[in-house]
Image (cartoon, rainbow, N blue to C red):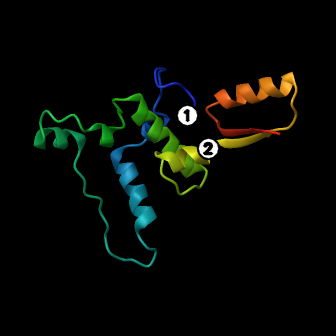
Amino acid sequence: QQTLPLSQELVNHVKELYEPFTIEEMNEKIIELVKPPDCNAQVQIVFQTIEGLHKSVPNHLGDWYFTGDYPTPGGMKVVCRAFCLWMEGKNLRAYGLSSVLVSMHTVLVIGGGGREHALAWQLGKSQKVSQVFVA
């Protein structure tokens, strides 16, 4: 989805990953991940539910951050990119110039004929290519 235009319908696949699990199951997994093996203390996750958030801050539209219901295609792209970076083991921001350049390529086209010109021209239009050099 990273290369889709912002006008095209995007799907939050990250949100879909969590759908099969209950809040309790996710809490248990978080505790398992953060609690050191030699810790004998009881650990609990304390959080505000979305319903509680709506009660405490009525008429506030900022719950997209917690629900995953991103109101803009740009926000949806950021969450999808963040997940891709996490899956690839890259510790990078999901937005900003440095993030974009990591997924882009620099291309060298060798030759001066019509085919090379056409190839360089098309590569220059690609969202996956940051620079095209022709030699």
* Residue sitting at x 34%, y 50%: 24
Q: Name the residue under label 2.
A: 103
In-front residue for pair 27/73: 73
Residue 23 lies, with reference to residue 113, above or below; the image says: below
Q: In the displayed structure, does residue 133 sit left or right of residue 44?
A: right
Q: How crowded is mark 2: few (under 14 residues within 10 Å), some or many (20 or more)?
A: some
Q: Position of residue 107 (x, y in %)?
A: 74, 40
Task: Looking at the image, tell me whether mark 1 or mark 2 is earlier in sequence order.
Answer: 1
For residue 53, which quarter of the picture?
A: top left
Q: Position of residue 15 (x, y in %)?
A: 43, 37
Q: Identify the residue at horizontal 45%, vertical 41% (top origin).
A: 79
Quadrant where the C terminus sits is top right
Can residue 24 be seen here? The reply is: yes
Name the foreground residue: 135 vs 60: 135
Disc 1 crowd rating (10 Å Cα; few below 14, some 14-19, many 20+) is some
Is 60 situated above or below 95?
above
Q: Which of 39 and 133 is in front in this view?
A: 133
Residue 75 x/y as whole percent: 40, 36
Left or right, residue 129 beside residue 97: right
SS label for mark 1: loop
State the image coordinates of residue 61 (x, y, percent, origin top left): 22, 34
Contact flag, marks 1 and 2 (Cβ < 8 Å): yes
Q: Which amino acid does label 1 sit on?
A: Gln
Label 2 secondary element: loop
- Numbered tag placed on residue 132 in the rendering: none
Q: Name the residue type under label 2.
A: Ser
Write the residue at 50% across / 46% down: 97
Q: How far apart are marks 1 and 2 (CA)?
A: 10 Å
For image coordinates 51% across by 41% down, the residue present is 81
Residue carrying label 1:
2
Residue 17 shows in the view: no
